[in-house]
Every structure is written in structure tokens, then in C-alpha cells.
Image (cartoon, rainbow, N blue to C red):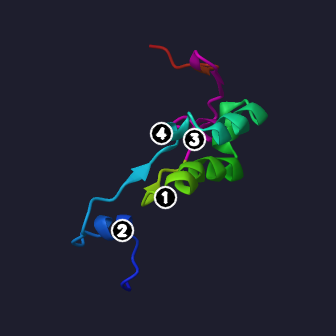
Amino acid sequence: MGENVPLLLSAALGNKINRPPVWMMRQAGRYMKIYRDLREKYPSFRERSENPELSYEISMQPYYAFKPDGVILFSDILTPLPGMGINFEIIESKGPIIEDPIEI
């Protein structure tokens, strides 16, 4: 790799770096008006997290505002469930509701 390796990638490769890299995840920017506006336009959390274009746009908001060394892709740990045949909804201020939960 050339000399223009991004700091975060250079650190991940184990190279000596001059400072620790800084990265952000979406939760760090919930206060941002641009995110609140997008959330109003797309009120479903699943729509925001499962639509690649929206997920990318949301992920990049803190990058454009603060220029950290990297960002964590906006998604949700439950995103793979529908692909496994497990349906769910995320209810605002309540959390995920799984249609047919496995109960022991």
C-alpha cells in the first residue's frame, strides 16, 4: 500500500501511527437536525436501517459534520432476521417485537 493509507486503516494494519484514529457511529449524532429531519421523512427505523441508500446517508452525516477518520455503518443487529424467516417490528420507545419468538 502507498503512503496515502487512511489513518484508521493504517492503525488496523498494525502500522505505527502519530495519533489514535477517531471514528463515530450514528448514535453520536442523534442530536443533529439533519438526522431528525430525515427521521421525520422516514419514521420507520427498519426503513432507515435496511435501505442501503438511507443507511449510507445517515452514516455519513457525522462524517460530513466532523470529518473523523472513519464511521460505523448505520444498521441494526436485527437486520438479518427477516432473511432467516423471523419477522419483527421495532416499536418507538418500546423496542423490537418478534412475531413468533422462540420460547423455552
Q: Which residue is mark 3?
A: 80
Q: Nearer the viewer, mark 1 or mark 4?
A: 1
Query: Image quadrant of residue 2?
Result: bottom left
Residue 57 position within the rendered picture, expressed as x and y whole percent measured from the top left:
65, 51
Magenta-colored span: 74-95
Task: State whether residue 40 is above or below residue 97.
Answer: below
Q: Residue furthest bottom?
A: 2
Circle 2: element type: helix
What residue would you read off at disc 4? 28
User: Was residue 90 drawn as part of the magenta stretch in this picture?
Assistant: yes
Q: CA distance from mark 4 to mark 3?
A: 23 Å
Which residue is identified by label 1?
A: 67
In the image, taking residue 18 as reference, residue 77 lies left or right, namely: right
Three-letter amino acid code of the residue under disc 2: Leu
> Where is 84 relative to 21, above or below?
above
Please give the label number shown on residue 7: 2
Front-most of 39 and 55?
39
Q: Earlier in the sequence, mark 3 or mark 2?
A: 2
Q: Earlier in the sequence, mark 4 or mark 2?
A: 2
Give the percent coordinates (x, y) of residue 41. Answer: 78, 35
- Amino acid bearing label 1: Lys
